[in-house]
Image: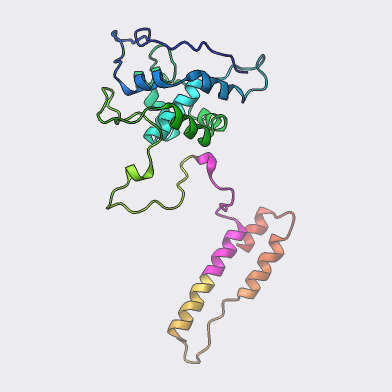
Amino acid sequence: MYKKPDYAQTDIYDFILPFGGHLDENNRWVILRRSIDWKIIHEVYEKNFDNKNTGNVALSAEIAFGSLYIQRKLSLTDRELVDQISGNPYMQYFIGLKEFRTERPFDPSLLVTFRKRLTAEMMEEISETMFPVEEEGGDDDGTPPGGGGTPSAAENETDDEPENRGTLIIDASCVPADIAYPTDLELCDRARKWTETILDHYWKECGPVRENGTKPRTYRKTARKRFLNVNKRRKKTTKKIRKEI
């Protein structure tokens, strides 16, 4: 379930710090929080919940959106993001907490749920319409300067760096399902095919080594036939698989 929060902004003087004092009003996370219309974000976030009366109370839209924005802005992994928030009072103020906490505000695995409720397209649209233009200069919390949207690829590239290619998967829960197990029969069969391709290539390039000029036997047809006989079976015992490998 999701409970509608009070849309009143938390003042920096009401945010409780363990070491006394108050937050700097010129810090970029403070400025960003004041510039966001959180009511709109709450309304978008609330649409993900059909049951609004029973069940566990979900974390607020401020925590979900604020955490995703920080992650996109600073290019952090899920675990690193939670560690950064747990040690930074300005980030905790930005995501709507009322006081500084040294413990983690939530488990890193919840970010997967946050990304389902606030998609990348929704984050981009909100960032473009509500966030101010980035300004030069740093902040007292040591984070990079600027306050608007997600950094573009052009900002991070230099003339000496190669162009980004491919996809890097960091989260272990996103590993492709087609990665074969080390003792998989199909993996063994693909390795055999590649080995035969290499042998055929060097046979063509280097020619025969034997005096009679014949090519060494690889028994590829026999190996392929045995692989298919086992792989087509509905039930394959561990003993049979080990024997064929």
Which stretch did the figure color magenta? 172-194
Image quadrant holding the C terminus, namely bottom right
Q: In this view of the protein, which residue sits in the foreground, 45 or 105?
A: 45
Q: In this view of the protein, which residue sits in the foreground, 200 or 72?
A: 72
Residue 74 in percent (x, y) is at 37, 33
Residue 189 in percent (x, y) is at 59, 64
Left or right, 56 with respect to 63, comes to right
Residue at point 63%, 23% (across, down): 49
Residue 114 in percent (x, y) is at 53, 29
Tell whether position 178 is magenta: yes
Q: In this view of the protein, which residue sits in the foreground, 132 or 102?
A: 132
Residue 131 visible at all? yes
Residue at point 69%, 54% (across, down): 237
- Asked if residue 243 is positioned above or below residue 164 in the image, the reply reads below
Tell whether position 131 is magenta: no
Left or right, 189 with respect to 27, comes to right
Image quadrant holding the N terminus, namely top right
Left or right, 41 with respect to 232, comes to left
State the image quarter where residue 240 is shown.
Answer: bottom right
Residue at point 53%, 45% (across, down): 175
State the image quarter where residue 241 is shown.
Answer: bottom right
Residue extending furthest bottom? Answer: 212
- Asked if residue 38 is positioned above or below residue 138 in the image, the reply reads above
